[in-house]
Image (cartoon, rainbow, N blue to C red):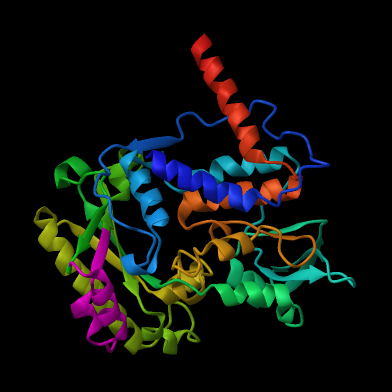
Amino acid sequence: MCLTLVLLALLVLLLLAVVPKTRSSQNPFSEDVKRPPAPLVTDKEARKKVLKQGVTPSHTTFAMHALLVDHYLQGAFYPRGGSSEIAFHTIPVIQRAGGAVLTRATVQSILLDSAGKACGVSVKKGQELVKIYCPVVISSAGLFNTYEHLLPESVRCLPGVKQQLGMVRPGLGMFSVFICLRGTKEDLGLQSTNYYVYFDTDMDKAMERYVSMPREKAPEHIPLLFIASPSSKDPTWEERFPDRSTLIALLPMAFEWFEEWQEEPQGKRSTGYETLKNSFVEASMSVIMKLFPQLEGKVESVTGGSPLTNQFFLASPRGATYGADHDLGRLHPHVMASMRAKSPIPNLYLTGQDIFTCGLMGALQGALLCSSAILKRNLYSDLKVLGSRVQAQRKKK
């Protein structure tokens, strides 16, 4: 654990190295923040610890693996009430600060002024475009979406933008299987555990063979499955959805296998697409029923989501839910130091997992780095002070 903390500290220090030390704003954590009661639930049962950054062992770093294993050694976390609670508790904080959260308002482009500085965004409201102007634009849409889709084409040719895009590539696509079950977690024997199911001891060769084979044969050679029961991790689930449980399975997927259908409308794609999607669903269910035979006759519904599904609902380029690939090139010190929150476009900042590492925790670190860059102060130091104050208050109680 000490080693992983040192590695994380070095990575954070590397990324914070260029945060200006002068003209800093006030500490945003100087006042107590009202927090929702018990927002997180520790998953003490999560002990099946395997690499989960979406890259095979020989293509990533020891530091990345160590951080993830240490994360699970300490126990994973799950939001009480489900992932929607994150937004539910975040939105009031934004509103109290004078901000607003808009839904069904897709950002079409980032606006630039005559000097080439970001000055706002163009948002789609119904069939019309509404321009919203602001002094700073922060994009959590990811590196590829921001540079390749939201910026004007002329700006994409800037050396700084081309350099960053040339350093990384989208990660591997993901296929999801959502399963609704009849019965409680006790009835079905479901635990709050993450299962990583492997079918080969050489993951590098298995993955290389899998993604290079024809798509018709791929369902028979799935190299790994991630299986979990979200409902079993949430203590409020039974109150909200009595006598129902859920399972989710994730498996790696080549975007090329579904690419020919990407121009067809979501929910109305042709028979070939549905046939291929169902073949992966059936292959996954076959494995799941062997591992959990007690679920026989308890399955109420099964739905599959392809990389095109991720691309539609999450705007994930090529269905890569983890954003930029976490390979050796991405994690090279020079590349990590180059992927700053402050973009080559004045007044445009990047946040989220593409400027740190993948997943919720990586995205949170990206947000801290982005906020530090904008406020011109090291928020990690501010959080340390806040943590000390909270601990002192607890001791008084």
Query: Left or right: where does residue 261 sit relative to residue 33?
Result: left
The residue sitting at 67% across, 43% down in the picture is 94
Query: Left or right: where does residue 339 sit relative to residue 189?
Result: right
Q: Where is residue 322? Give x, y as percent.
A: 46, 64
Quarter of the picture containing the N terminus is top left
Query: Toward the viewer: 200 or 126?
Result: 200
Considering only vertical position in the picture, is 155 above or below 379?
below
Corner quadrant of residue 180 = bottom left
Considering only vertical position in the picture, is 330 above or below 152?
above
The residue sitting at 63% across, 64% down in the picture is 338
Corner quadrant of residue 269 = bottom left
Q: Where is residue 370? Give x, y as percent.
A: 66, 52
The residue at the far right in this view is 114
Considering only vertical position in the picture, is 41 above or below 132?
above
Q: Where is residue 15? Give x, y as percent.
A: 61, 53
Q: How many numbered marks appear?
A: 0
The residue sitting at 52% across, 20% down in the picture is 391
In this view of the protein, can residue 84 be seen by the observer? no
Query: Left or right: where does residue 269 sit relative to residue 94?
Result: left
Query: Toward the viewer: 225 or 239?
Result: 225
Q: Is residue 206 magenta?
A: yes
In this view of the protein, can residue 245 be seen by the observer? yes
Q: Is residue 252 magenta?
A: no
The residue at the far top in this view is 396
The stretch of residues the image draws in magenta is 201-226
Q: Where is residue 327? Give x, y as percent.
A: 44, 68
Considering only vertical position in the picture, is 30 above or below 21?
above
Query: Toward the viewer: 128 or 23?
Result: 23
The residue sitting at 40% across, 73% down in the picture is 173
